[in-house]
Image (cartoon, coloured by chain):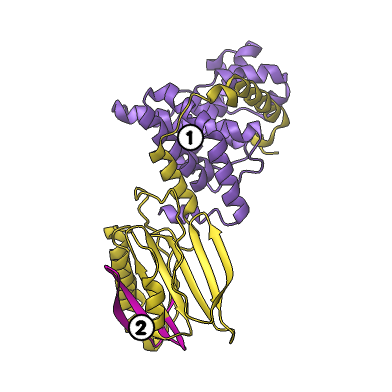
Amino acid sequence: MNLYQNSNLLNAFDLYVREQDALLPREEELSSVTLSPAFHEKMQRLLMLRKRGFYVLFGTAGRRVASILVAVLLALTTATVSVKALRESVLHFFAEVFDTHTQVTFVDETPDINVPVETVFEPRTPTYIPEGYVMEQETKLEAAYIVVYVNGDGSKLRYKQFPKGSGDMQVDTEDIVYEEIRIDEYIGITYCNKGFTYIVFSDERYTYTLSGVISMDELTKVAGSIQLN
Amino acid sequence: MLLFYLSLLETQEDKDKFEYLYKRYAPLLKHVAYQKLQNEQKAEDAVHTAFLNIIKSFYKIDDATSHKTRHLLVVVTENVAIDMLRKDRHIARVDFEDIAPTLSVTQEMLDGLAVQELVEMIQSLPEIYRTVLEMRVYHGMNEKQIAAALDISYAAVRKRLERARTMLAANIRKQEGVPYESVSK
């Protein structure tokens, strides 16, 4: 039998731990212990991080576009993900695997823990919705706000808002061509893929994505109606 | 690498548990760290690092509400705080080697003692040895998990465990009236 599984030793540790535990202050005695907002933010950030950080799926034809798009997305989020290592890791990633893989899952392993986290998430709804669309689903999470609108044809318009640098983003970049777009004072990108139009942009606090089977002009109007910082 | 560690919290249940641990025990752990560090900011840093170490260790918390879990968090936090103190004071961490003749505790030795006697011997162990032994025996952690939780090397864990066993054996012999020096391996 393994020495570490000796029941006598185990019982002794159990008794020892119980004795030690009894010496710890109870919760009601800890009311004077305060935790700073900075600590809460740091821990909150720890909790918000997810297993899947940042995904890019791309096919052979879209490789070059994919690399550009990722670079643009990173540039957009630079204020939050201002991690030199992250950008370098992306360059390294493409240099290493760009010519050998057609579909790659990329995971950001170097988020900056010191980036202030959004403590009070403020959902922002577009005030302009194209005619015929009604809200089908609204999801408010601790760190994301997602609204799905649908029209009479069943076409959906999706809107997602999340704190910069906190969420994961899936971008299917195969065969796409993107364009730079300006929403209010903020630069974003827009592209079409498989009949869907997409807009991705960020202000100081949040990243917004909009998508739907809808014209670029209409989607831009929706994006422009969001109350930004 | 942080996200990699957090990716170990694979399920929503793990994440919820982690959040529960943080919300419930952060004040206690800060109190524990503050006792050692006497500095609010450093105490919070210690708690943060302790949580990270727990995640890194791959150790699965079964019951977030148990005294066992609470004690593990306390032990890890204390260890982090001591390490911070050590670094602040530029004190090197020394792992003992060959200070005493190698002697290992046996099943028979342990079985021959009353539980309370063993508790006293556990208490008499220096903290760094007691901690690794507690993690190994009581929490069922393996050497790699202990190394990650305490942020020390795998070799250091093995050495400390060996040393803990040696000390226990020596204490038992001493209680039995056998001079330590006369005991061979």
Residue located beneath label 1 in the image: B159
Q: Is residue A219 above or below residue B134?
A: below
- Disc 2: host chain: A
Mark seen at residue A63: 2
Crowding at label 2, few (<14), some or many (≥20) Cα neighbours within 10 Å?
A: many
What shade has chain B been given?
purple
Check the picture and name the quadrant holding the N terminus of chain A. top right
User: Three-letter amino acid code at disc 2?
Assistant: Arg
Q: Are marks 1 and 2 in contact (CB under 8 Å)?
A: no
Q: Quadrant of residue A61?
A: bottom left
Residues in magenta? A171-197
Q: Quadrant of residue B110?
A: top right
Q: Is residue B169 inside the magenta stretch?
A: no
Identity of the residue drawn at 35% across and 69% down: A201
Q: Nearer the viewer, residue A11 or A177?
A: A177
Identity of the residue drawn at 56% across and 45% down: B18
Where's residue B171, x and y in %? 59, 17
Crowding at label 1, few (<14), some or many (≥20) Cα neighbours within 10 Å?
A: some
What shade has chain A been given?
yellow
Left or right, A3 with reference to B25: right
Q: Is residue A11 above or below residue A1?
A: above
Report the Cα–Cα distance between label 1 and label 2. 51 Å
Mark seen at residue B112: none
Where's residue B149, x and y in %? 49, 40
Where's residue B26, x and y in %? 51, 34
User: Three-letter amino acid code at disc 1?
Assistant: Lys
Residue A79, visible in the rendered structure: yes
Q: Nearer the viewer, residue A93 or B179?
A: A93
